[in-house]
Amino acid sequence: MNRRDAISRVALIMGGAVIGAEFFISGCKSTSSQVADLFQPDNVAFLNEVADTILPTTSSPGAKAANVGAFMGVMVRDCYTPADQKVFMEGLTKLNDAAQKQAGGKFMDLTADKRTALLVALDKEQKDYTTQKNKTLADDAAKHKGEADYKGPEMPNHYFRMMKELTLLGYFTSEIGATKALRYVAIPGRYDGDVPYKKGDKAWAT
C-alpha cells in the first residue's frame, strides 16, 4: 500500500481529511526541536500503549508490535506544522489528565478495560469538537465570501484525532499491518477485476 492510498483509507475511516496529509504525500520535512521529547523511551512506550488500545492484538498483532509509538514521533516531528506539534505535545499531558479525571490514575496504570473506556470517550470528544470546528469555519467562510484577503479563524486540531490517525496510518503501512492484518502480495500476478468476496476476508494491502 503506498502512502497516498493509506492516507485515503484513514480519511475514510475517520470521516474527514487527515491532519498533515499534504506533507505526508509531498515528503515530510518540517522539523522542530519542540518535539524532541517524543523520542524519549517513556513517551514512545506511552504512545505504543495508546496505539495498542486503539488497535489491540486480535487474530493479528496489535499496533504496539509495529512500534507505532516511534512512527508517531517521526511523523509529528517531520510532517506537522509547529502549531499541530504543540497541540500533540500538550496532548500527552491532556490524555493523562483525562485518565486521572475519569479513572483515577495515569493512563499507563489503568487496566485494559479502563484504557478502552477512556479512549472511547476521547474519540467521541474529538468527533464532536471536529464537527463543531468544521461548522464554525464553514459559517465564517460563507460570511466573508468574496473577500480576497480573508483569513479564517485559527482553531486548533484535537490531539486525540492526531493520535488515532497516526495509529491507523502507522499500523497499516507497517510490515506487520500489511502482512498480518491485511492481505499482501509482494509481486502481484495478472489483473483480476472480479475476485469473489467471502465474509470475513481481509482487505488487500497491495
Image (spheres, rainbow, N blue to C red):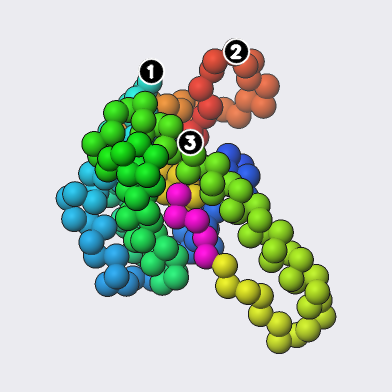
Residue density around tag 2, few if under 14, some if 14–19, many if 20 or more, within 10 Å: few
Name the residue: 27% across, 43% down.
106
Rendering coords of residue 26 (x, y %): 49, 64
| Main secondary structure found in the magenta portion | loop
Rendering coords of residue 206 (x, y %): 50, 34
> Which element is circle 2 on?
loop
Residue receiving disc 2: 198
Name the residue: 62% across, 16% down.
197
What type is the residue that disc 2 sits on?
Lys
If you read the primary sequence from the N terminus, does the residue marked by circle 1 or circle 3 appear first?
Answer: 1
Indicate whether residue 157 is drawn in magenta.
yes
Q: Is residue 86 above or below residue 104?
A: below
If you read the primary sequence from the N terminus, does the residue marked by circle 2 or circle 3 appear first?
Answer: 3
The stretch of residues the image draws in magenta is 156-160
Is residue 48 visible in the rendered image? The answer is: no
Q: 191 left or right of 75?
A: right
User: How far is mark 2 from mark 1, CA to CA?
Assistant: 17 Å
Name the residue: 74% across, 71% down.
140
> Which element is circle 3 on?
helix
Rendering coords of residue 22 (x, y %): 53, 63
Q: Which mark is residue 120?
A: 3
Is residue 40 visible in the rendered image? The answer is: yes
Indicate whether residue 20 is drawn in magenta.
no
Residue receiving disc 1: 59
In terms of depth relative to the viewer, which is nearer, 14 or 87?
87
If you read the primary sequence from the N terminus, does the residue marked by circle 2 or circle 1 appear first?
Answer: 1
What type is the residue that disc 3 sits on?
Val
Label pair 1/3, CB-CB below 8 angstroms:
no
